[in-house]
Image (spheres, rainbow, N blue to C red):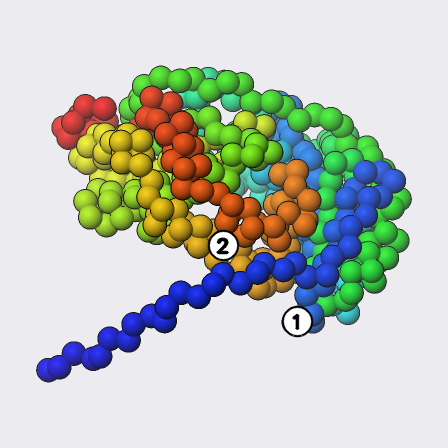
């Protein structure tokens, strides 16, 4: 039987220009930065409100988690007639409320959102529901291997964790949260100062901005400056952490990264993509595809509170864990011994540009990109300049970043799993 003819992909064309939709920005008297953008393809609007919100201790952490659940329930109930979808969650330094709504209800949704931020009016029933929800969720979250391995890495790096870095709250403290606790916690932590509101919809930015200002200008700057800092990470060896019942082993490595404000941030971003940041990276093609040592492998740039980090994750069989760890360290050494090529840089550049273009082609993608840029300290216009900035990064820039930041001696971490099986394979 003859095979079907192979159709080759068309040749690559010039990368199109990244153009932001029409945008308006303004600050409220309380310090909330509002960004309104027009995306007129659908009759919906996406809203993302990001408020600085870092727990200072474990009790604070538990109250934050319960508050998020209570606000999600109460705001969702108020918005049922609008057909809007609501998601409220806290991650590290941010308390985020995301809403998708039909455009015709935008004014009502913004009004309810502003009221929820100023005075949520969480009743006894909603508070009790939120406590039950969070306390029942915590054991399941804590039992997840990815959560367990994240805690193991953070503990290895920092010893006792700042509360804002703990992946899950403590169940006994969540169970003790009352409606009065939530009201007090809300007053102390939720406000306009340093917060960002992004609204992307079919209305022109000026119309959207006028609606936002109507409801959010009265928002007080009551949230406190409570941003905790991350202690310096431990620099040392890779340590095995016993989880005898696991059928899979997690390798988690970390090293200090580079601040986004540094001119070399994009150099490191491209070096990370070449090393392990996408499907054609050295780690993915080598460790996963050719050697078959990992079910999943990825390198990424992340943050531990105010500290930028480079993170490497791999999931593998216990008997292969030690060998896989050594191979990852070998791939790190190759970043200097086998310098990044111009072809690798060009592929990584096209991947990063394509990712930005895909995000800019949807309403929710634009909302996410703008919100992320703002929370990292960038201005909305910086997103459109990404392609030009990437084009200005040379192969020599990426080689220098790879040699400096991907030195294996900079990395430390944990191998979490069945350590007896690890020892049978090869000592870490």
| Residue 128 image position (x, y, % from top left) | 67, 41
- Please give left or right for residue 53 compared with residue 258 in the image: right
SS of the residue at dot 1? loop
- Quarter in which the N terminus is drawn: bottom left
| Residue 177 image position (x, y, % from top left) | 66, 32
- Please give left or right for residue 418 compared with residue 94 in the image: left
Sequence-earlier tag: 2 or 1 = 1
Label 1 crowd bin: few (<14), some (14–19), many (20+), radius 10 Å: few
Instruction: Using the image, tell me which numbered label, if any, was put on residue 42.
Output: 1
- Please give left or right for residue 342 compared with residue 108 in the image: left
Which residue does the numbered mark 2 point to in the structure image?
353
Q: Residue at x 62, y 38 (%)?
A: 376
Q: Residue at x 78, y 50 (%)?
A: 25
Look at the picture and state if 270 lies above or below 58.
Answer: below
Instruction: Using the image, tell me which numbered label, if any, was put on residue 21.
Output: none
Q: Residue at x 35, y 17 (%)?
A: 236
**Does any portion of residue 33 appear in the rendered image?**
yes
| Residue 41 image position (x, y, % from top left) | 65, 71
Whole-angstrom CA distance, mark 2 to mark 1, is 24 Å
SS of the residue at dot 2? helix
């Amino acid at each position: 039987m003859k095979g079907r003819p192979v159709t080759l992909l068309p040749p690559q064309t010039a990368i199109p220009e990244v153009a932001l939709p029409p945008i308006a920005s303004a600050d409220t008297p309380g310090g909330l930065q509002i960004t309104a953008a027009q995306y007129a393809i659908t009759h919906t609007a996406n809203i993302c409100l990001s408020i600085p919100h870092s727990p200072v201790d474990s009790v604070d952490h538990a109250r934050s988690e319960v508050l998020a659940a209570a606000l999600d329930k109460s705001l969702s109930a108020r918005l049922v007639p609008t057909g809007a979808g609501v998601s409220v969650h806290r991650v590290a330094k941010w308390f985020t409320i995301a809403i998708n709504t039909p455009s015709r209800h935008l004014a009502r949704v913004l009004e309810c959102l502003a009221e929820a931020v100023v005075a949520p009016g969480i009743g006894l029933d909603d508070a009790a529901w939120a406590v039950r929800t969070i306390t029942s969720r915590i054991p399941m979250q804590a039992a997840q291997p990815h959560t367990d391995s994240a805690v193991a890495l953070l503990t290895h790096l920092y010893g006792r964790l700042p509360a804002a870095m703990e992946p899950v709250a403590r169940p006994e403290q969540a169970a003790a949260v009352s409606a009065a606790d939530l009201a007090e916690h809300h007053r102390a932590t939720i406000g306009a100062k340093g917060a960002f509101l992004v609204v992307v919809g079919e209305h022109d930015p000026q119309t959207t901005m006028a609606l936002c200002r109507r409801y959010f200008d009265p928002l007080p700057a009551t949230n406190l400056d409570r941003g905790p800092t991350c202690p310096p990470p431990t620099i040392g060896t890779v340590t095995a952490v016993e989880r005898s019942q696991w059928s899979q082993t997690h390798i988690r490595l970390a090293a200090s990264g580079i601040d986004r404000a540094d001119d070399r941030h994009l150099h490191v971003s491209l070096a990370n993509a070449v090393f392990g940041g996408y499907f054609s990276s050295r780690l993915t093609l080598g460790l996963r595809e050719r050697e078959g040592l990992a079910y999943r492998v990825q390198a990424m740039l992340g943050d531990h509170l105010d500290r930028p980090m480079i993170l490497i994750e791999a999931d593998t069989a216990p008997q292969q864990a030690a060998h896989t760890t050594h191979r990852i360290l070998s791939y790190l050494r190759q970043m200097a011994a086998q310098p990044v090529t111009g072809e690798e840089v060009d592929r990584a550049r096209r991947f990063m540009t394509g990712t930005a273009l895909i995000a800019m082609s949807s309403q929710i993608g634009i909302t996410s990109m703008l919100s992320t840029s703002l929370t990292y300290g960038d201005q909305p216009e910086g997103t459109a300049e990404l392609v030009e900035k990437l084009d200005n990064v040379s192969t020599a820039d990426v080689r220098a970043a790879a040699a400096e930041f991907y030195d294996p001696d900079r990395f430390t971490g944990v191998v979490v799993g069945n350590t007896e099986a690890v020892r049978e394979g090869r000592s870490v």
